[in-house]
Structure formats: C-alpha cells, structure tokens
Amino acid sequence: MSQTIGGAGQDNLLDLATAVAGWARDGEQVEAYVARGRDTEITVFGGEVESLSSAESAGIGIRVVAGSRQGFAYAGSLDPDVVAETLEEARDNAGFASEDSFVGLASPDGVEVASLDLWRDDLASYPTEVKVARALDLERAVRAADPRIRQVESSDWGDAAVESAVATSTGIRAESRRTACYLSAFAVAGEGAETQTGGGYSVGRSPSDLDLDKAASDAVERATRMLGAVKPRSDRLTVVFEPRITATLLAILSGTLDGEAVLKGRSLFADRIGEQVSVAGFTLVDDPTDPEAYAAAHYDAEGLATRRNVLIEGGVLQRFLYNTYAARRAGTVSTASAVRAGFKSAPGTGARAVSVVPGDRSPEEIFQQVGDGLLVQSVSGVHSGVNPVSGDFSVGAEGVLIKGGEMAGPVREFTIASTIQRMLTGVVAVGNDLERLPSSASGVTLAIADISMSGE
C-alpha cells in the first residue's frame, strides 16, 4: 500500500487516527478510533492471592462510508502495516454492505468540550504488591467487623487506565484518557444454620480515593441485617429503593430513552415527547460532563463533545439519546450519545452518566415519610423481568420492612411488580444521597408508592 503513517507513531494516538482518516479517497468517509489500555484485577481469599491478572491492549477500529454503504474492521495492533490492512478490510466490507441512506460519519457541531480531569498519574506507578496488600487488608477488615461474619467470599482490587482518540475525514479530532480503580468485598454472615450475603465497594480515579472502611462496613451491614429474613405476606405498599437499586432502575429507564430503541419500536416512550410521564419532582439527566460520574467523558464514541442531556424535566419527557446515525433516521441531531465497547465495535447509542437530580430528604427522613413500607437492597431477574416495550416490571427482591418509619425485620424470597409507567408516576420522595457507582448510572434513595409485593 502506498500510504504511510509518517510521523504518526504508536505513542501519539491522535496523530495515528488523523493520519488514517486522511487516507480517505474521493467520495469516501473514513473514521479511525484508536485505543490503548492497562488493567489489573486481583482477588484474594483466605489471606492468600487467589488470582492476579494484569494486561495491556491496543488496537484500532476503522469505519469506511462509501456512498450509502458502510464497512467496519478492527485490529488488535497499531503496527503500520496492520493498520493499512485494516483500512482495506473496512473498504471491502463496505462494498458488501446493504445500502442505507442514513449512514455517515459525525461532523463537528460546535459544542465546547468540557474541562474534565479524569486521569491520575499515581495509578500507573502504584505497586502491584500494594494493590494486593489493600485487598488483603479489606478481607481482614470485613472478617474483624462482626463475629457473625463467617467468610469473605472474595476481596478484590481492580483498576484501569484507558487512552483513546478518534479522527474522521469529516473534521473530527478528539482524544481523551481516564483512570478508575475500586475495592470490593463480598461477605457471608451466619447465625445457626442460616447464612446471608452482602457486598460493599469503594470506587475512584486514584488509589487515594478508595475508602477501605466504607467498603468493609457496607459489606458487613448488608450481610448481617438480612439474618433472620423471612418470606413476607403479599401486599401493596410503598417501596424504598436503595441507591444501588435505583441505579439499576435508571439504567433500564435510560435504555427505553435510547433513540435506536425508539426507532426500532422497542420503547414504551415512543411519540411521548412533551408529555408528563412522571411527577413534578422527578428530573432525569445524562451528564457525562459531571467529573464525579464514573463514566464521565470529554467526547462520545464518535468524537463529539459530550453534553448534559436532560431526558425528563419536572416529570415531562424532553428528549431521547442519539448518535449520528440514529439522529439522521429520526430527522434530528446527535445528542453526543454514541457509545462503544472499544476498538472492536462500531458505535451504538446509550447513556453514559444517567442520574436523578437529588431531592432534599435524607434516607431517614424518607423512611419517616413512608411510615410503613419496604426497603429493597437487592433485586434479581432484572433482564428477564422487565419489558421495555410494555413497561411490565416484575423482579425478585430482598430487603427490610419499614414499620413506623424505622427499619424492622428483614424479608426475602418475594417478588415486586408494577410497570415502569406506574412507577414513574408513583414517585413520592427523592433522596439527597447521590451515590456514584461503577456503571453508567448513579443512584439516590427513591420511594415509589403502590407496588405489589408477592410473598406468602
């Protein structure tokens, strides 16, 4: 091949991506997405290292749009010859693709890039033996916290450092990098023949952000407070979701507000823009420009500057999330909501940092407001129990009954059921305890009235 990368070395991802985008032929659009990363995962058990893995990866994904056809190819190497071969493969794939008048790459839209500090140099220099020591310290802390802790099933350290760049022949030039790390533990508590489990964690961008005591106490509390749990009687009641569970619900909700899902008829909110879908005190945003969000980002997966997208404001549905392709199909513009798993995939659409705008009440104040109800601390069967088209919602759960505004006895082996539509209109309290989770969603304590609990 005649093209050469020239001065674009493997160390400068943006230069490499820009060089590849510059190889576009007449009548052709080329996008190069280049990524490089390092990650470590450590699990300890019984005072010993059970597993330790550390890996580095680098690669490129190339999209070619020729006329109304699109091709994609990737390679797990940044070698110049491999990059050139990957471009040719993407061209070949475009030649065999079906015609689609909506395909095309993103172009700069003038949105200013948020000033975010998502990289911590100290993670790269943090010794592996110290990472192991912190996982062991967490295991010991969980064991020592309560005599009812019988075992720590796992105590884990994890971290990742990711750098990426995207450039297109349509004028996109974007690069970013981020670090993240976590500590987590999964405890088993017991009394007599009964055992219960609970997990705790702490996340951050730097090792100094991690709170070992918080992770330990969280795991212990969640395991021990479920001891003595019984199957409850069936009832209709107000359910209080802990922040972790709220985050799970918001991830489901954001999926129904995905523009691709709407276009494919897989969303219960199609054709409802401008309608009141929740209570006035409920505002839902996807804000990757929030530096505290775990998945905060300067750019989306197509190189557009991220922005704060208000999805539901004061209970009124405001917008859906779009990447460039979905926006063209919908006759609108991208919300900079392109996402991808890495260089091995072309971009799709999705939320990065969805959350409810916090309210003004603490969890304790919400318990007092509810009086008698149910606190849910874990759910199961979410993917099979929630229908994004009909809105039907039915999942297994466990938690603690609320009596007179106070936590009472633990309960398990029951199902909670409603619909997404009824749950949104049944919100009675939004907590002020915004909790950052290692996912695309953050959570708050959320109370929702009139949910069916099926037990005995």
Image: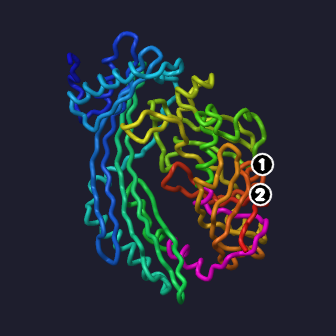
- Give left or right: position of 144 versus 453: left
Residue that badge 2 annotates: 428
Residue that badge 1 annotates: 279
Tell me where residue 190 appears, x and y as whole percent.
51, 84
Tell me the kind of residue under disc 1. Answer: Val
Distance between the Cα atoms at labels 1 and 2? 8 Å
Marks 1/2 in contact by CB < 8 Å: the verdict is yes
Task: Tell me the crowding category of disc 2: few under 14, some 14 to 19, or many 20 or more residues within 10 angstroms, Cα based.
Answer: many
Task: Tell me the crowding category of disc 1: few under 14, some 14 to 19, or many 20 or more residues within 10 angstroms, Cα based.
Answer: some
Classify mark 2: helix, strand or loop. Answer: strand
Check if residue 349 falls in the magenta segment: no
- Give left or right: position of 34 versus 241: left
- Give left or right: position of 244 versus 142: right
The magenta span reads: 218-247
Closer to us: 213 or 9: 9
Tell me the kind of residue under disc 2. Answer: Val
